[in-house]
Structures are given as C-alpha cells and as structure tokens.
Image (cartoon, coloured by chain):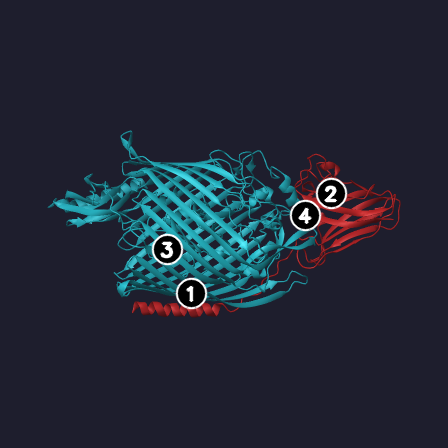
Amino acid sequence: MLKLTKLIISILFLLMSKLAFAQDCSLTIRGQVTDKETHEILEFVNVYIVESGKGATTDEHGNYVINEVCPGDYHLRFSHIGCETKEQFISVNVSTEFNMEMEHAASLLEGITVIGKQSETSTQNTQILREDKISDQLDQNISNILESISGVQTIKNGNGISKPVVQGLYGNRLTILNNGIAQSGQQWGNDHSPEIDAMVANRISVVKGASALEFPGSNLGGLVLVEPSKIENEPHLHGSTSLAYNTNGRGASLNVQLHKATDLIKWKINGSLKKSGDQNTPDYFLNNTGKEEGDFAVQLEKNFGEKWFTDLYFSTFNTSLGVLRGSHIGNLTDLEAAFTSDVPFFTEETFSYAIDAPKQVVNHHLLKLHSKYFLTDEHWLDFTFSGQFNNRKEFDVRRSGRSSIPSLSLQQFTYFIQGKYNAEWKNDWYFKTGVQVNFIDNTNNPETGIIPLIPDYFSTESGVYSILTKHHKSSVFEFGVRYEYISQDVPTITQTIPREIIRYENGFHNIATSLGWAMDLSKDYNLSANVGYATRNPAVNELYSGGLHQGISGIEEGDPSLDAEKSLKSTLTFKGNKHGRFGFETHFYAQRIQDYIYLTPTQETRLTIRGAFPVFNYAQTNAIIAGFDLSGQYNFLTNFYGRLTYSYIKGSDTEKQQPLVFIPSNVLKANVNFQSNKQFLIFKNALENIQLNLGSKYVFKQVNYVLEQDFVAPPDGYFLLNLEGSAEMKIGNLNWRFFVNMSNLLDVSYRDYLNRQRYFADDIGRNITIGIRTKF
Amino acid sequence: MINRTNFLASLLFLAIFTMISCEKDDPIIPNEEEVITTLIYTLTPENGGDPVVMSFIDLDGDGGDAPTITAQPLASNTTYNGVLELLNEQETPAESITEEISEEANDHQFFFDTDVEGLTVTYSDEDSDGNPLGLATKLTTSSVQSGSLTITLRHEADKSASGVKDGEIANAGGETDIEVTFDVEIN
C-alpha cells in the first residue's frame, strides 16, 4: 500500500514538474490558525510544506507567512502542542491565503470549550469525544468508550455486552444515531449492545438535553450521536492503520481507513477486525467471554455543481459475543446457588478463544442516501433515505445438540425517509423543519422451537417537527415542537394451549416540545437552560412480551393496557473558562415521568416443570429522575492539568415513595494529565506530543434500592486506577502514534451494580492495551 | 427544479410506506420439540401389587395455565422399583424425552430429595462412566407419615463432585431442566 502511495505521489510530482519550467517562485502562503472550538487564535503553531520542508511559525495573532513558494500542489502540515497534527492539501497558483482550525486532543473539558466568539447553535448540553480518544480505544465497544463522559454510564452483561445509560435513561428511552440514522435493532434488551463500530466515528457526542426533537425514536432527552466526518478534500490516497493488543482476553484489534478525493467522487473506506478470548478477573477466568467482530463501512460523497451535495453510506457490523458460561442457569434454585458461590460454576483453569453457547451472533447493516440542496446560501433542503437490517440470534445451552439452534432469532428491517428544510432568516433567525417516516418490520424466526418472548410486528412512526432559533446579542433562544403518529400491528401467540394468534392494532400520538435559552454572561461564563415536555408510547416488548426470559431467570409479561409515558425535563448548565486556566461545568437536571414504564416483580411465582419462577410485570408508576454532573479542571501549567468530575443521580418512584430500580450509582473521577512540550530524538526522529494521563474512579455503592425488586442487594463501591500514555513520531512520510492504556491497574476485585454478571462473577481484572497507529 | 423532484420523490415514498404498513402476516407458531410437558414416576412394589403413580403435567410449557400435579399414596415398609418417564405431549403422538435423556446419560442426573423420615431413593441405573443417572430407581418406605418428594434433573452437572454419586445435589452445579415437588402420603 505504502509503495503504491509513494508511486502515486512520485507520478504526481513528475506531472507537476512540467509546471516548474517558467516558475515564479515568489508566491506566498499565508493564513491564520485558530482553535476549532473556542475560535481563539493559536500562537506558536508550526506550519510547513511537507514537499519542500519550508515552514513558519504563527505569531501572537495566529498568523503565519511562508514566502518564496513556487506554484504547485503541496501538503501543509500544522502541528501544535496538545493538538492533533493536521495535514492539508493545497494547490498554489497565485499567492494564497489558507486558514486552519485545529482541535485540541484533550481540550479544556470536553464540551466546555464552546465559549467566546460565537455562541453554541444549540442550547442543549453536548459533550464530545474526538478521533484520537476514540481510536486509542479500538479494542473497546462503543458503550465502554462513552463511559468517559460524565453522566454517562453503562448497563452490561459482562464486559463485552454493554449499552449506554445517559442520565438514567437507556434502551427504549435513549436514541442512538449512527450517522444521522436512529439505530434500530432490539433496543429493549438490557443485554443488547448497540451494533456500531466506534472506529467509523470521528466524533461521538452525547446530548444531555431536555428533548431531541429532530430525531425519530424517544424524545425524552438523551441522545448519542456517532458521526463520521466529511471526507477531506485531498486528491491523494491517504489513510491510517491501527493495531492494538489487549492482555485481558489476549485480544487483537485492527482498523484500516483509506480516503481519497477524485474529480469524480470522494470516497472513504473503513474496516475493523477484532478477536479476543476469555477475559479474567484478578482470580479466575471468565469462561466463554470471547468476542469476534468484523466491520466495514464505505462512504461516498459527490457534489453536483455548487448547490447539490450527495453522500452515500453503507456499513456492516458483524459480531459473535460469548456470554459467561456460569451465568446461564436453569431456574431460581440455580440462581440462588450461584449467588452463594464465590467462583462461578463451569469455571475452568484454561484460557480459550472458543465461543460456545450461551452466545449472541448479531449482524447489522445500514445503507443511507443523503442529499442536500441549497436553494440559496440561506435556504437548503435535505433529503435522507435509509434502510437497516438487524439480525440477532441468541444461543442457549440446550439438550440433545440443540445448542446450535438459536433460542432467540429476530430479524428486523427498518426503513426511514426524511425531508428537511433549513433556513437562515434575517436578524439571526434560524428555522428548521422536517417530515419523517420510520417503518419497522420485526419477525421471529420459528427455527428456535420456542414461543418468542416478543412478538412479530409492524410499526410505523410518522413525525413532523419545527425548530426556531434566534440569536440575540449574546443569547440564543430555541423553541421546537414535534408531533408523531405511531401505528403498531402486532400478531401475538397465546401462552395457553391450543396456541392461537391474537392481533393487536394500536395508534399512539406523541407530542414533544422544548424551550431553550443559552447566554454568554461574559467572555468567560455561559449559562443555559432547557425545558422539554415529551410523550413516549409503550414499546411492543412492554405491551406484549410474554414467556420465560432466560437472561433474568424470570417470567416476563407485558401489559396491553399500558399508556404513554409523559415526561417533563428541565436542565440547567453553567460553565466557565477563566483565562484558559480554570474551567468548570455544572449541569443539573430533573425529569418527572408520569406513567413511567418499568419491569416489576409481582407477588406471584409460577410453577413450571423446571421449578418455580418469579413473574415480572410491566407496570406504570410516577417517577422522578434527578441529578447533576460537575466537572472542574485546573491547569497548573500549560501542559499539566488536573480534572475532577462527579455525577450524582437519584431515581424515585413518587407513587410508592421508594427508589427506582437500576439507576446508576454515583461516580467520582479524578485525573491528572501531563503533556510534554519537549521532543526526544530517537534515531534522528523526533518523538513528540507525549501525553500521560493518570485517572482514578470511585463508584459509590447504590444505596437507594428496594431489596424486593432485585435478586441480591447492590454490591459495594469500588475504586479503580488507570493510566494512559501516548506519543507521536514522524518517520519519513508516515506519522506514527503509540499508545498504552492500562485499566484496573491495581487488579481490584469488584462487582458493578449495573452489570448483570455481578450475580455470578467479579468484573474483569487488570488490562493493558498497547497499540500503534500510522497515518499516511 | 431539482428541489421539486426531491419533494415529489419524498411524497411518493411516504405514500408507499403508508401503504406497506397495513398488516403484518400471522407468525408461524414454532414447534416446541424441546419442551418437557409431563413427568410420570411409576412405582411398582417389588413384591407385587398395583403400581403407584406420581405425575406432573403442564401442557402449555413455561407460561399460561398452572400444571396438574397428582400423587397416589404409598404403602409403609415397602420397596418399590421406580421408573421415570418424560414426555412432550404437545406433539401428537407424544414424544418421549426419556430417550433423549438416556442418550445423553453422561450429561444428566436426577436427584430425589425428601423430608419424609425413612424414605430413601437409590439409583438402579448408571451412565457409560459408571455414574448414576436416575431414570430407574429403588424407593423404600418405612413408617406411616406424610411430606414431600422433590425430583430434580440437572443438565451438565459435575458428577465427580463430592456426594453427587450418592444423590446429594448440593455440589452438583449444572442447570436445572426439571424441578417438581410431590406431596407424599404413606399409609
């Protein structure tokens, strides 16, 4: 690949050299370098032409000038301490001005930096993870990566299967957008991970707002956005390769990305392969917790003239995930026996890569076509069509060789179509409106030989929304409404003999509205507030699930008479950034959900030939979920900072005057980060951008619980230490990045409240991931 | 022009989608061949006489209606030859699960727990490793009394664990395929 790249570059140079005859080598390239987030000017940025080595440094106004440049095609390389090094292709025929925005790899608090020149376009609190942070964790799944954001936790079934929890909301209540499309699979399952390869994303953000009106799915507040960036306007083939090895699970991960902009089309491909075996706690192996994953994505962009932009995106995600053998149990007696056993049943002394039942095999494919057409500079239309296919098969340990037949086999097709209109009006008014239809076709494959837990269904969601934004002086005001009509057509199979089919046809109206205000109090402080009201119709699993849920060792029963949830949420954010020295963010939220739908144990136990099982019913109550996320950072030196974050959350059932079940524990995190501004020469190559981060995390014991709602009381709190390091080096034309992530450094034995595996086993012990990435 | 085409195309799609979403086909009802609906424990007195039958029948499997449990009284100071039969009566004719269990004898073991004093159950069959299975048993009663008898079938139990060969369930591990309790009356 490299040789090919070199060859292509050489050929291009040969072609270019004919331009070099009558050259006027007195051109200049000049420009200004600013921070992408704060728009502050950046001093001491090194800028040089890769081809000629000629360079300059930005002055106190962020300006640079490179003189005596010959006409030609060049790559400009921008490097600055603490920033991701950027290279940009530039074609120079006359003296050129080229401005650059750089991103701080570890900005002063994620999401806090949007203060200054221009207010945020949204009044909702958003926290962002950027490329380096994502790709340094290529061995992790997307939920585990998201955990580094304050206020985001995960609900897990072992380390490999996890889904994000944002301000206490997850599953049906939390929408995850993959490249602008609401991820559609079996979101209801607490043991169903989002089927997204984080490595396709250049940016993952979490919106902790009051209501997300622009998107289908739940509008209750939280939103996770996974976004690949636009393809760079770079006529040469470029890309990156990352490779990582993790000790816990003895896993390897590989990611390759390539992109190129030709006159015809811009393209980018992204592929990942991951394989890992049994993970281990400090004391024993967690048998059958291996994972295999193969993902691929293609992104194409084409501009038709100046006004019409089109892109096509295809991604495929394929995984096989082992579930701890000892967590698969027959009945309540087995479950109780498992609680009293220190080491899970079926624990073996030997490590293995084999993935046997119980396991999950999941495929998810997404195709998206998106077009944007500018009527004028201020008005544009936006059109999206997407199709998704989700294929989930779960295998249990079964008799007579039936372990190879899935116990759950669900196929889901989702089609989405959207038309949007955006306008920038006079006097800083912005208007967005859109129409959407989302159609879901969910089918159980009868190959299982088991009456399905959730029925087959059609669901059609048609929505319209409008959002109006006004910038006035240093304030932003935002007002939006959304209306949705959801129709469900659900043929269910009876639990009693003879089996019959009972059909349900439902129609629900969802209404959501939100009001927001953000204001820069001064150059350094920003205040924002949001209020949102939204309704969420009961999902098919909440209405009609029925049968034994092996995963929770209980019989689950839906309630066809459930009403929609009605939520009122308010958020308040105050953030500040004093002279780039001290930064803080305080985010408060309170959400009242009327008719909150939850799974609750009933007094009944049902006798089956396998023994007695507890019966869980979907029920409704009134709930309040409230909490705050606090973060503060102090820069002791320009390259040395300390950061403290604390997340507090409490969920209450106001009807029964008791705590809500499965609300995340409170978390306190502290870390110190050091970036070296020195370069170290190794074989004449400079090792630079050296960064060290020592992090610690204390997860408090969940003390708000009702013992009757769970099988065992929440586990104790725990303290974890982790250490991360990274450095970069340029060798020839290649940029290399080296990184090491050490988690659970002290090899602590612990169990986490929201990890279902805690009923059976400890969480994973120390892990060291070492990795290398090259950009070319 | 193009925006109008876009707009018309969207309308068309909207119309198509609304039409598709009329009715989901009836699901195919899965064939539940793995289900055990019925357990029959037939106890024939060693010295002749009418057999005593205990049965647990739950035709709709895990959910739905409650099972039917019956147990005929036992005679005191008697030794019975016990035979367990497992059926899936959702199939017609009923499918014998007993065969499946004896084919996978090494992976299965029955356990018999009771609070009736003097009532003992011993294994009279074994798997290919010489470990007990429990489809065939010998049940002995002593005095007149009543209590309960629980029959458990464990899948992938650790037969080499302490006491398991003697029918003690405590260290067996594995997964429970069957756990039924009968009220026992000894006359």
Q: Nearer the viewer, mark 4 or mark 1?
A: 1
Marks 2/4: CA distance? 12 Å
Q: Nearer the viewer, residue A453 or A401?
A: A453
Residue at 62 percent of width and 42 percent of height: A339
Q: Earlier in the sequence, mark 3 or mark 1?
A: 1
Q: Do the dots labelled 4 and 1 sit on one chain?
A: no
Q: Which residue is mark 2?
A: B111
Name of the residue lying farthest toward the front: A521
- Spatial CA distance of label 1 from label 2 is 60 Å
Mark 4 vs mark 3: same chain?
no
- For discs 1 and 2, the disc positioned in front in the rendered view: 1
Q: Nearer the viewer, mark 3 or mark 2?
A: 3
Q: Are both tags, 3 and 1, on one chain? A: yes
Q: What crowding class fits label 4: few (fewer than 14 Cα within 10 Å), some (14-19), or many (20 or more)?
A: many
- State the residue in front, A290 or A504: A504
Q: Is residue A449 visible?
A: no
Quick one: SS at disc 4? Answer: strand
The reply to whether dot 3 and dot 2 touch (C-beta < 8 Å) is: no
Q: Which residue is mark 1?
A: A482
A747 versus A363 height, above or below: above
Q: Give how far apart the Cα atoms at labels 3 and 1 are.
A: 22 Å
Q: Chain of mark 1?
A: A
The residue indicated by pointer 4 is: B177
The chain letter of the cyan chain reads A
Identify the hue of chain B.
red
Is the residue at mark 3 from the same chain as the one at mark 2? no
Distance from the alpha carbon under mark 4 to that under mark 1: 50 Å
Mark 2 secondary-structure assignment: strand
Can the viewer see residue A595?
Answer: yes
Q: Amino acid at mark 4?
A: Asp
Specify whether A192 is left or right of A39: right
Type of the residue with mark 2: Phe
